[in-house]
Image (cartoon, rainbow, N blue to C red):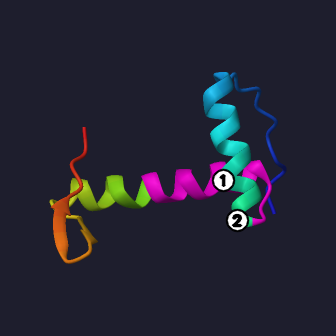
Amino acid sequence: MDTPIQVKVNFSHEAYAELASLAKRRGKEMVDIISDALALEEYLDGEHQKGTLVLVDKDGSKRELVRQ
């Protein structure tokens, strides 16, 4: 297994509170939430590069997830 690399990140107070809240709700460490977010971003970017249309369905209403 690779040796972890320590990184210092500065968050706004609001972003830190959101990260802490999400970690608490999911019963995970904040680093795991960040890792999950990175994995999701990598997946979505790869799909976008392939031209895949990613949809979000809420109550039967579908919306395209637009990447910038």
Tag 1's secondary structure? helix
The stretch of residues the image draws in magenta is 27-41
Compared across the picture, whether 25 is left or right of 63 comes to: right
Compared across the picture, whether 17 is left or right of 44 comes to: right
Between 60 and 16, the residue placed more toward the observer is 60
Circle 1 is placed at which residue position? 22
Disc 2 crowd rating (10 Å Cα; few below 14, some 14-19, many 20+) is: few
Looking at the rendering, which quadrant does residue 18 occupy? top right
Return the residue found at the far bottom: 60
**Residue 49, image x, y percentages:** 23, 54
Residue at left offset 78%, top offset 65%: 27
Looking at the rendering, which quadrant does residue 17 occupy? top right
Residue at left offset 84%, top offset 50%: 3
Residue at left offset 17%, top offset 68%: 62
Does residue 43 show up magenta in the picture? no
Q: Is residue 15 visible?
A: yes
Which numbered disc covers residue 26?
Answer: 2
